[in-house]
Amino acid sequence: MSEKFLANTLQYVERAAKLLDLPSDDLLQLQTPHREVRVELNIRRDDGSIGTFIGFRVQHDDARGPFKGGLRYHPHVDAAEVTALASLMTWKTAVAGVPFGGAKGGVQVDAASLSPGEKQRLTRRFIDGIHDIIGATKDIPAPDVNTNGQVMAWIFDQYTKYHGYEPGVVTGKPVSLGGSEGRAQATGRGCVYATEELLADRGEALAGKTVCIQGFGNVGSWAARDFAAKGARVIGISDITGAYIADEGIDVNAAVAHVTAHQSLEGFPGGEHLPGDTLLTKPCDILVPAALSGVLTKDNAAEVACRYIVEGANGPTDPEADAILAKKGIVVVPDIYANCGGVTVSYFEWSQNMQHFYWDEARVNQELRRVMARGFADLRATANKHRCSLRTAAFVLGLGRVHGATKLRGL
Ligand code: NAD
């Protein structure tokens, strides 16, 4: 599964390299990760036994700035998945135009099986294993699947024990520890801004559009809130417990309150409960996959019945599915642009940490809006120039910028 994700990512990169006429040795240099670290993590479980886990950090490229990328806790985490995600970060930071490279980390663990104390001990052990290769000017982790502001706070604290006060070592921190206003909302909010850019390009408005969102964690739930606040009708949401469908519209705030109270959508009374995958093929205007990679495949792409896909998740669409969707006339706003709001506000957080000067949320949102608008304009111009999809345009843009920086720096 994750080998396929890595192969898919390389395929998208190679397609862009062809359009850019990159020499094969330049491409190999850009594709090869800078450093791959694997650490054994032993923790004392609450019942007195020893839990042994494996953690990964892949630093893909730092030609344009320090390595940057999230940290995921999930049973599917392995070297191939983390490498694919690190590579996507390299192209994403370049598309967003933020001065970072690409990295990703993860621990192979079922996060739901950990008590808060075990999760804290695991996080601190992981930082014991990688503290010497991270830092505000080296490599800056952030939240991803099953990690959040609390996990970032533990990372900050553990790193501080080795290296002293350095809040810029990690982003997505709680605001009270030097986090940025608007960071928690940023990825989902960025997806909504990306959708507005796409619709404006096509002379359409967001108000009244129907939306289905897969995944109701950080990205999905904030996207749902912003879509609803802007007058779109969220008719389907889903999480690991299944899909919840209501054609008249889901009460998004009630769904958020349910998850806050029960940790998942299980038992949410505000929609018909159906198997999770039904959400992906439900007729709607906008589909937002905001859970895991590889969910749109050659097996279900023909049944997808939306007009637009906005990729909140990283790598949700296989290349075979991409081709089927394009034939059906479905426009895909690709992950490395659509979900770059997270890393963009992480950049704002990092630069606030470096200056010890903090912004209000209105300023964060305004700057994020500017980055998303500029990003879409760049994507549109690149797609027009090369007569290609927005996805290929995004990879052309990202690869071109990283290649340019690499050449300028020399070997
Ligand atoms: P999260 O852990 O907060 O939420 C994940 C959600 O997905 C949960 O609701 C979970 O129940 C759901 N889910 C898991 N498996 C599912 C399945 N099989 N079907 C339906 N739902 C399922 O994670 P997140 O931070 O929201 O990340 C979601 C995606 O967005 C990931 O692909 C991540 O890499 C990407 N992303 C996150 C950020 C960020 O800032 N958090 C930034 C960019 C991209």
Image: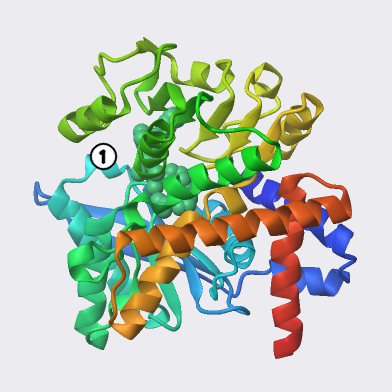
The amino acid sitting under disc 1 is: Ala
405 to 249, vertically: above or below = below
Residue 308: percent from left, percent from top:
64, 31
Q: Nearer the viewer, residue 158 or 195?
A: 195
- Left or right: 34 as drawn, with respect to 326: left
In the displayed structure, 250 sits above or below 128; it is above
For residue 40, side relative to residue 119 (left or right)? right
> Which residue is at a point 43% across and 45% down the rendered structure image?
188
Disc 1 secondary structure class: helix
Assess disc 1: are there few (<14), some (14-19) or many (≥20) residues with their C-alpha within 10 Å of its C-alpha.
Answer: few
Would residue 17 appear left or right of 65 to someone viewing this image? right
Q: Residue furthest left?
A: 47
Q: Which residue is mark 1?
A: 112
90 in relation to 276, above or below: below
Residue 106 lies, with reference to residue 134, above or below; the image says: above
Q: Nearer the viewer, residue 116 or 313?
A: 313
Q: Identify the residue at image location x=36%, y=50%.
A: 185
Residue 267 seen? yes
